[in-house]
């Protein structure tokens, strides 16, 4: 539903009635706002996106594509939780194919594969979830794949131990889809002392995958933010799903191209963080990995202050 909020009282009434209606309770709301509108109030009523007047073509495309991506995700029977972790695949005559897991549920996952998989083939793969030290091993089958290398995997055979690890992680990371406020999880991947030699070897291979060569501890989070192409004044609302002193992962349906310079702004009640970076990896429909470009000690200190807040407290909401 696209709604002009020039008459803010009337727009607020329409939004409230829509969300209290059984038929329209899940309707996405895009509000057209001006400088006089109370945007925070509109968001509190359930507005999903806003477009600032005068409306530019670029800004409208970004918001409408984001709404389209959100509607696609809502059609899933079991909600997926975004994740960014390497996974090893084995199928047909291929024993060790590298990939990156993009989201996961109790029934399946989406991955970014380095090579095209045979249609409807059976896949054996293993991965370590953020915040976990034990490998998840299971088998599945290819449900779909597209020209960009994204593949949907439907789980077929999940051993009891792997099922327990997966379910526990999904339970503790449920805030990624519900926007609640769980405990923040610190996610350095450490080899367990009791792990078998095979597990240690497999985990070492996982760490060596491109995109996972990080020396910094990564912290799972759900931070509302704005990201800009460097030099552009058009804000793109997004969410940071993990952060470290060296970079972050930005969740947005229409990520920028690899090597694009960007600027990210995070506002909280006590601080405003503005940091520049460079897009390292991009996953259309999901998000992008950004490496920070920190010029001096004050910028590094700002990022560390934000990490300290994330590590110590609940999820932060953006301040407008």
Image (cartoon, rainbow, N blue to C red):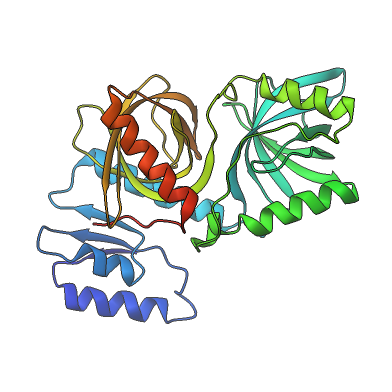
- Vertical placement of 161 versus 198: above or below? below
Q: Is residue 110 left or right of residue 229?
A: right
Query: What residue is at 23 percent from the left and 73 percent from the top?
Result: 11
Q: Is residue 16 left or right of residue 184?
A: left
Q: Quadrant of residue 5?
A: bottom left
Q: Which quadrant is home to the C terminus?
A: bottom left
Who is closer to the viewer here, 195 or 111?
Answer: 195
Q: Position of residue 300 (x, y in %)?
A: 34, 30
Q: Which quadrant is home to the N terminus?
A: bottom left
Say how many tags the image has: 0
Q: Position of residue 295 (x, y in %)?
A: 28, 21
Query: What residue is at 74 percent from the left and 39 percent from the top?
Result: 133
Q: Position of residue 215 (x, y in %)?
A: 55, 24
Who is closer to the viewer here, 147 or 130?
Answer: 130
Asked if residue 73 shows in the view, the reply is yes
Q: Position of residue 214 (x, y in %)?
A: 55, 24
Q: Quadrant of residue 234?
A: top left
Asked if residue 121 shows in the view, the reply is no
Q: Is residue 216 left or right of residue 14?
A: right
Query: What residue is at 71 percent from the left and 25 percent from the top?
Result: 206
């Amino acid at each position: 539903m696209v709604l002009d909020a020039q008459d803010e009282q009337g727009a607020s009434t329409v939004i409230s009635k829509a969300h209290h209606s059984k038929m329209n309770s899940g309707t996405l709301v895009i509000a057209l706002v001006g400088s006089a509108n109370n945007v925070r109030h509109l968001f509190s009523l359930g507005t999903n996106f806003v477009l600032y007047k005068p409306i530019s073509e670029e800004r409208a495309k970004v918001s409408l594509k984001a709404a389209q991506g959100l509607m696609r995700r809502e059609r899933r029977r079991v909600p997926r939780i975004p994740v960014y972790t390497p996974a090893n695949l084995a199928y047909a005559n291929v024993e060790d194919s590298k990939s990156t897991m993009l989201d996961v549920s109790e029934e399946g996952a989406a991955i970014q594969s380095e090579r095209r998989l045979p249609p409807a083939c059976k896949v054996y793969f293993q991965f370590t979830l953020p915040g976990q030290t034990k490998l998840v091993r299971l088998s599945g089958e290819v449900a779909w794949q597209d020209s960009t290398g994204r593949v949907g995997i439907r789980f077929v055979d999940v051993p009891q131990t792997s099922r327990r690890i997966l379910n526990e992680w999904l339970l503790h990371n449920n805030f990624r889809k519900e926007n609640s406020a769980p405990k923040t999880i610190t996610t350095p991947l450490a080899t367990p002392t009791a792990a078998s030699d095979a597990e240690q070897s497999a985990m070492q291979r996982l760490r060596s995958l491109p995109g996972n060569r990080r020396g910094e501890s990564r912290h799972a989070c759900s931070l509302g933010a704005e990201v800009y192409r460097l030099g552009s004044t058009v804000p793109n609302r997004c969410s940071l799903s993990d952060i470290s002193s060296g970079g972050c992962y930005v969740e947005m349906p229409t990520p920028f191209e690899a090597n694009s310079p960007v600027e990210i702004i995070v506002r909280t009640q006590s601080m405003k963080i503005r940091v520049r970076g460079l897009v390292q990896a991009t996953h259309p429909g999901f998000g992008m990995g950004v490496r920070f470009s920190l010029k001096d000690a004050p910028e590094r200190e700002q990022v560390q202050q934000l990490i300290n807040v994330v590590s110590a407290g609940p999820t932060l909401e953006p301040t407008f």
